[in-house]
Image (tube, rainbow, N blue to C red):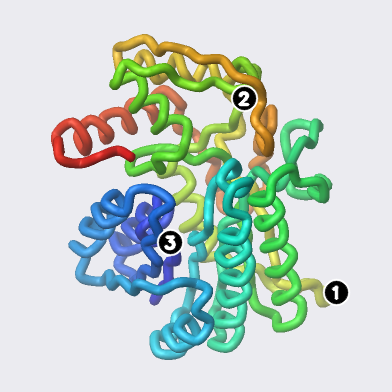
């Protein structure tokens, strides 16, 4: 089939586009190549994707409604995998307008382009951050999510509501995936695993928030891509009572890990000890995430299972190959 993958120069977008190309699909990757983190890293991902004869890159900002509409009209995509967004909880405290442009205006433009061009299934990235400070564990997709604690989380919840509206009004099949702390090779420099690895190798302290009293449901990127590729082939249908063709799933390992245990995994993979700088909880952070993935498993027959130590070792190997063997590169 023919796919549009937004955010193709990003972490999950790169892995998804690569997988789809390997499966023989035609893929157009879209990205605006912003400088939220290293543009060089984004270009390196794109260089690998361009090795596929069935991949083509379009540099375009989601806020460009006309450009996006023209692209979709010209290409006639059968599937849209929407992974582009302004990421980062803490950055949303500094640059709220960027989140409105990318995550709200950009998402409306995606919905409109899909509606106007009869896309067969829109799969989009949501986030575990929508659960906020909810205490019942594990998180289920029918849990209340009306108290976000960051603007980033609020924009992701807004995306879910907007997608449901388009499914209801226009019968556009939409599926949202709530990602839980995705990590792995080619990961983002603003994520904890990347920061910890860089700091430990440089002999610098790592910042551990809430004195380490936090846990996350870490999910290896290959597991995320497997679930995503399976779900894209299963567009939701209009229900017997006329319900909208909209679905939401958690995609996580289903096993929360203490932040301090994660740090120990990094130390083992690097063969070095971290210098630990304990700090209070930061605004917008949550104490724990834990995904209930039963619905995803029932729908796709797949349940993420990569152990954290294995995934971290693969990340560390990639990091060393990319940065230590490429001395001119900067991990910033």
Position of the C terminus by quadrant:
top left
Residue wearing tag 3? 7
| Mark sitting earlier along the chain (2/1) | 2
Between 53 and 270, the one lying in front of the other is 270
Residue wearing tag 1? 241
Near mark 3 (Cα within 10 A), the count class, few <14, some 14-19 or many ≥20, is: many
Between 59 and 52, the one lying in front of the other is 59
| Distance from Cα at disc 2 to Cα at disc 1 | 40 Å
Near mark 1 (Cα within 10 A), the count class, few <14, some 14-19 or many ≥20, is: few
Q: Residue at x 45, y 66 (%)?
A: 6
In front: label 2 or label 1 = 2
Q: Quadrant of residue 241?
A: bottom right
Residue 9 location in percent, x, y?
35, 58
| Distance from Cα at disc 3 to Cα at disc 2 | 27 Å
| Residue 298 visible to an observer of this rendering | no
Residue wearing tag 2? 215
| Mark sitting earlier along the chain (3/1) | 3
């Amino acid at each position: 089939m023919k796919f549009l993958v937004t955010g193709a120069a990003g972490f999950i977008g790169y892995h998804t586009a690569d997988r789809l190309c390997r499966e023989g699909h035609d893929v157009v990757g879209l990205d605006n190549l912003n400088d939220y983190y290293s543009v060089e890293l984004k270009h390196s991902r794109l260089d690998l994707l361009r090795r596929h004869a069935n991949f083509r890159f379009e540099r375009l900002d989601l806020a460009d409604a006309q450009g996006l509409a023209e692209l979709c009209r010209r290409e006639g995509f059968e599937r849209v995998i929407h992974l582009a967004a302004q990421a980062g909880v803490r950055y949303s405290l500094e640059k709220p307008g960027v989140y409105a442009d990318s995550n709200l205006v950009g998402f409306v433009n995606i919905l409109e382009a899909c509606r106007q061009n009869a896309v067969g299934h829109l799969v989009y990235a949501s986030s575990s951050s929508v659960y906020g400070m909810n205490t019942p564990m594990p998180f289920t997709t029918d849990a209340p999510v009306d108290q976000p604690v960051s603007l980033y989380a609020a924009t992701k919840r807004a995306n879910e509501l907007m997608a449901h509206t388009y499914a209801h009004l226009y019968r556009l099949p939409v599926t949202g995936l709530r990602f839980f702390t995705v990590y792995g090779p080619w990961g983002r420099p603003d994520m904890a695993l990347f920061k910890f690895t860089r700091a430990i190798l440089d002999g610098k302290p790592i910042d551990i928030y809430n004195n380490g009293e936090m846990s996350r449901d870490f999910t290896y990127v290959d597991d995320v891509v497997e679930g995503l590729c399976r779900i894209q082939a299963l567009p939701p249908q209009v229900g017997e009572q006329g319900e909208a063709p909209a679905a939401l799933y958690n995609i996580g390992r289903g096993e929360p890990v203490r932040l301090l245990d994660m740090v120990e995994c990094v130390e083992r993979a690097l063969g070095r000890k971290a210098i630990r700088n304990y700090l209070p909880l930061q605004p917008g952070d949550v104490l724990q995430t834990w995904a209930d993935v039963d619905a995803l498993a029932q729908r796709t027959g797949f349940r993420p299972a990569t152990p954290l130590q294995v995934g971290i070792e693969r990340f560390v190997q990639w990091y060393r190959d990319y940065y230590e063997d490429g001395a001119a590169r900067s991990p910033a």
